[in-house]
Each structure stands twice: as structure tokens, then as C-alpha cells.
Image (spheres, coloured by chain):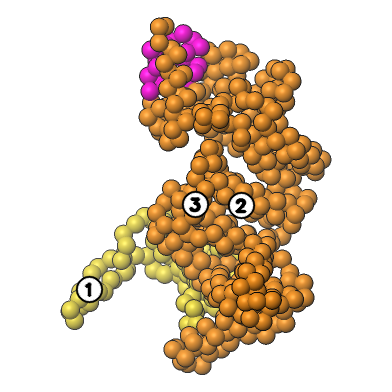
Chain colours: A yellow, B orange
Amino acid sequence: MQYLLMAYVNEGAWPKMTKAEQEQGAAAYMAYGEALKKAGVLAGSNRLQPTSTATTVRSTNGKSQVLDGPYVDSKEQLGGYFLIDVPDLDAAISWAARCPASGHGAVEVRPVWSMAA
Amino acid sequence: MNFREGDEQARGTAEAVARRSYGKLVAFLAARSGDVAAAEDALSEAFASALADWPLKGSPSNPEAWLLTVARRKMIDSYRGQRREITGEELQDMAEGLGAAAIAEEIPDQIPDQRLALMFVCSHPAIDASIRAPLILQVILGLDAKAIASAFLMSPAAMGKRLVRAKEKIRQAGIPFRVPEHGELPGRLDAVLDAVYAAFAEGWTDPGGTDAARRDLTEEALFLAYLVTELLPEEPEALGLLALMLHAQARRLARRRADGEYVPLAEQDASLWDSHMIAEAEALLRRASALGSLGRYQLEAALQSAHVDRCRTARANWAEVVRLYDALFEIAGSPVVAINRALAIAELHGAKAALQAMPEVATDARLAEYQPYWAARAELLARMNDYDEARRAYEIAIGLERDPAVRRFLQQRQSALQGF
């Protein structure tokens, strides 16, 4: 089954970190990505630009509304994701627990919609 | 054999199989398809077919295998039905994957018992803790949402919805059907035991046994606790939980007088206790402690054991009781444990020390609506000769109690303070 691990983190913390801390943080994510690759479970991953770059679009009655900013305004924001392919939820949870974001934010685990379900 | 006789016999066989094997058959089907709701539906259709078929053709020699074969066919049919509605190659593969894996396998002569794995699924951390006990009661024992809802003080419609949602989560999130491995077993087993105990405790809130649905629940919960100890005979906490439940069950009759009035432990007639059950509980506890890993349920069972011993021998053992509560508070600290610990301290060091040991509403707001907190406070205040405060605390306790017999008991205690 495929699961999307969504990393929610406090994006305000990143710019406040020293360069050494940023490097260390990035290295942890790199190592995590490598581990996923080595285990043969990684189906895709990306880091996202901060929500200051976000634009939210919504259409009502055929009219599009374009708004500056993220869909939900909260302290912890979606900062990136890992799409993994593992046998079951327990395996997905154990990968989520290794994700650095689970230490300084939270990781939401969502099964990908299976068309037979 | 005429038709009527055959009908009754078939019904009897079906009911016996349902009682003995329902959970086993659901577990077998659900473990293969990952779909608890579909397994339940197919099985209930299979039981309906049995009631139509067995009176005519006679009960089969292996009723469980018969039911599984029919249920399996119903599951294939229902997957095929879905496939017709939603076409596309990918969908077909998925439906076949689910169906084929579930169904192509031969039904073994001895149906493997996967009820334990199913209980771990129902109490998985990804399932909301408050729905785990109802889910186990429904999936393993086949209780309907209405009976479960009444025990958990919830509307049947709301309970039904929550159960459906939980089963959908199991299927869609891909919660695996397996017994956790050694390292993670203790933590995961705690969740199973907590769910079984919750089922028991909800049944137990009707100690008079006047509500048939709830009385049954304590027995069903005991069945589940036995089941866990049979399938995991070396887990001390599982043994401890069963010992705790047997102790509580053993004193059930003594908790009410013939006229229905509530009798506190110290005033119970010990000859009404079920001594076989108590002996069984003691043996389980010894087995558990020999395994050398102490836990919450073993300590709670040990406390029950100490209470029973004190009442039987009239030998005060409050120092031992306080020590057990200390240990319990250490690993499973809760206001409830703190209150009981304070009451034991009252016997050992007096009411003043006990009042100091009581938890406070200021630090835990839930206590304000917790009847035993106010009853314990009232009791301790009365012993300190602070009658006005004691009366006030009884007043609050009485207002919070939902069992009429306990309410009357508290009212008697309160009116005994008159004249002081």
C-alpha cells in the first residue's frame, strides 16, 4: 500500500537556526531519504517552499478566487512529504517515527486512495 | 425426523456454532480480506443460509467449515458486484487481489484461531481509544450496536456510526492483522487489556444486574479475558487482569442485600462470595508473579486479594494495602488510585493524614464531577468531626451518583451525621 507521510513543522524556526544547525537539520532529512531509498520503499518526496509563497485558489459559481497565503493558517505547516510503498499501516508508522519532522513537528500518515476501496 | 424437529435442531446447532465460533470465523475472513465489515456481513448471510438449509438437509458434519465456505462465496459475490459497478483494469486487479487471496485458499480442517490478531487490530493505536472496547465486543462476540450502546451510555445510532467508521479505518488505513512481535507486544497488549477491562467495567456499573444487556457484558468481558490468557498464557498482565475481574465477579452477589440495598465491602457477607472464583483468581495471580514482571493489573488484583484476605481473617493489613497502592500509583497514577490510597491511609494513619493525601479539585478538574471523590472526602471529614463539611460533600456525591442503591446508601450515611 502507498502512504503519504506529511511533515508538518514550524517553518518560523528554520530561519532562526544557525547555519550549522540548518546543515545538520538538512543532513538528517537527507539521511532519512537515503534510508527510505535503500529499503526500497520510497515512491517520491519533496520539500516545499514556506507558506509565505503559497497561493490558495477556490472556485465558486464558476468564478475563481485567488488568495495569498496557505489554505490553513497555523503554526505548524506542511513542509514536505514522502510517498512510500509499504505492506501496512504499522510499517508506515515506523517510517513516520524515523522522519526527523516527528521530532520537531508532526508527521501525518495517510493511505493513498485505492480505487478498489 | 419431521421438519419441526429438524428446524429446532438446526437452529440449535447454528446458535451453538455462533456462540462458540463467531469471532473465530470473522477473524479468519477478515484477516484474509482486511475487511472486517465485509467479513461480518458475509458471515451473517451464511448464518441465515444455514437456518434455511440445515432443517431441510440436516446439519453438516463440520458446521464451521460449511459456514466459512458459504461466507467466502458471499464475499466473492460482493466483490464481483463492486467490480461490475466500477470498471477499469486496475480496479479489477484490486478486487481480484482482495478476493482471490481471501478465497482461493483452501479452508483448513482446523480453522486457525486469529481472534487475538483481530483484537490487536481493534485496539491498534490508530483506532480511537474510546471505541476499542465496543469494537472488540462487536467483532469478536457479535454483539449488536444497540446492546453495546446501552452499556456505554451512548445512543445506538451514534454507536453504530462510530463502529462503522472504525471498521472503515481498519480497511482503508491498512491496519495489519497480526500479533505484535516481542519488543512491541507489552505496549500493544496493554491496549487490548484496557479495552477488555473497559468492557467489564461498563457492565459492572450495573452491579444489581437488573439491566440484562449490561449483566451479559461482564460475562462477555470475562470470556475475552479468558481468551487472551489462553492465547498468551505467558503474559503476566493478561493473567493479572483475569484475576482482577474474577475477584470483582466473585463478590457480585454480596454487593446487594436481598432488598437491593448496596453493601460496602467491609460489611459484606463473605459466605456469599464465590470461593471457587476467588481461588482461581489467586492461582492466576501466583502464576503471573512467577513470570517476574509487575504491572497495573497484577497490582490491582493483588489489592483485591488483600481486601478479601482482611475481610476473611479480620486481620488488619492496611500497611500492605498502602504499599500496593504506592506501587500502583507509581506505574498507573490516577486520581482514582490516589483516592483509594488515601482511604487506606486513613485506616493506617488516621483521617487527617488521609485528607492530606487526597488529590485536589484544584489540580484535576474532573474530580469535581467524580462521585467517589466526594464520598471519600465526606467519609474522612466525618471522621475528623467536621460534620458541616462532611454533609456538604455527601450532598455533592449524592447528586452525582447514577445508581439508586448507592445513592440511598450515601443518603443514609449523610443522615447518620444528623445530631452532630
B361 with respect to A68 (left or right): right
Kind of residue indicated by mark 1? Val
Q: Nearer the viewer, residue B286 or B313?
A: B313
Q: Are marks 2 and 3 in contact (CB under 8 Å)?
A: no
Q: Which residue is mark 2?
A: B220
For the point 71% across and 60% down, which residue is it? Answer: B181
On the image, the x and y values in percent for residue B237 come to: 70, 45
Mark 3–mark 1 Cα distance, whole angstroms, equals: 41 Å
Kind of residue indicated by mark 3? Ser
A70 with respect to B151 (left or right): left
On the image, the x and y values in percent for residue B355 come to: 51, 18
Is B26 one of the magenta-colored residues?
A: no
Mark 2–mark 3 Cα distance, whole angstroms, equals: 18 Å
Can residue B198 be seen by looking at this rendering?
no
Tag 2 subunit? B
The range drawn in magenta is: B377-395
Mark 2–mark 1 Cα distance, whole angstroms, equals: 57 Å
Give me the disc on residue A66. 1
Are there few (<14), some (14-19), or many (20+) residues within 10 Å of tag 3?
A: few
Is B379 one of the magenta-colored residues?
A: yes
Q: Are marks 3 and 1 in contact (CB under 8 Å)?
A: no
Looking at the image, is mark 2 or mark 1 nearer the viewer? 2
For the point 74% across and 49% down, which residue is it? Answer: B235
Are there few (<14), some (14-19), or many (20+) residues within 10 Å of tag 2?
A: many
Relative to B249, say whether B15 is above or below: below
Whether labels 2 and 3 share one chain: yes
Looking at the image, is mark 2 or mark 3 nearer the viewer? 2
Tag 3 subunit? B
B56 with respect to A115 (left or right): right
Q: Quadrant of the N terminus of chain B?
A: bottom right
Which mark sits nearer the N-terminus, 2 or 3? 3
Q: Quadrant of the C terminus of chain B?
A: top left
